[in-house]
Image: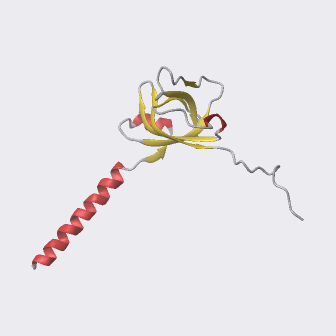
Amino acid sequence: MKKSHIIILIVIAVSIGIVFISLNSSETYASFTESDKNRDKVYHVVGKLNREKEILYDPQSDANLFTFYLTDKEGVERKVFLHEAKPQDFDKSEQIVVIGKMQDDGFHAKDILTKCPSKYSDAQTTEVK
């Protein structure tokens, strides 16, 4: 076998290995139930804010801790600990995606995505004649 063929085979094998490693470590969407079963894996959990329960952010005591309760798509509710400042317009959000891991005391998020209502509603749009 030629040296060039051996080098090409090694490059292909390394490439396949990198693809498998990246697929195993990729973050996926899940529910709180699934993230509770696999606590070592990072998940994206989609849900709605429970406005009836405590939403706590005290920047004077800890500016990098924001807690709230989120109900996922299956109806399971968990306390979420976001280790960042409270996002702007968080209270107006329709849907929330938290990214993190489940722990004993709740879901610990490293990041959050909020979907706020559109600033353009049907009532505000007018037809030009």
Q: Residue at x 41, y 25 (%)?
A: 104
Compare residues 95 and 1 and report the one nearer the observer.
95
Q: Quadrant of residue 69?
A: top right
Compare residues 28 and 49 and report the one nearer the observer.
49
Q: Quadrant of residue 43?
A: top left
Residue 51, given in percent of the width and then of the height, sits at: 65, 28
Residue 11, given in percent of the width and then of the height, sits at: 21, 68
Q: Residue at x 53, y 22 (%)?
A: 58
Q: Residue furthest toward the right?
A: 129
Q: Residue at x 47, y 33 (%)?
A: 84
Quarter containing the C terminus: bottom right
* Residue 56 in the image: above or below residue 29: above
Quarter containing the N terminus: bottom left
Is 88 left, or right, of 7 in this rendering?
Answer: right
Q: Residue furthest toward the top?
A: 61
* Residue 45 in the image: above or below residue 24: above
* Residue 108 in the image: above or below residue 99: above
Is 32 left, or right, of 14 in this rendering?
Answer: right
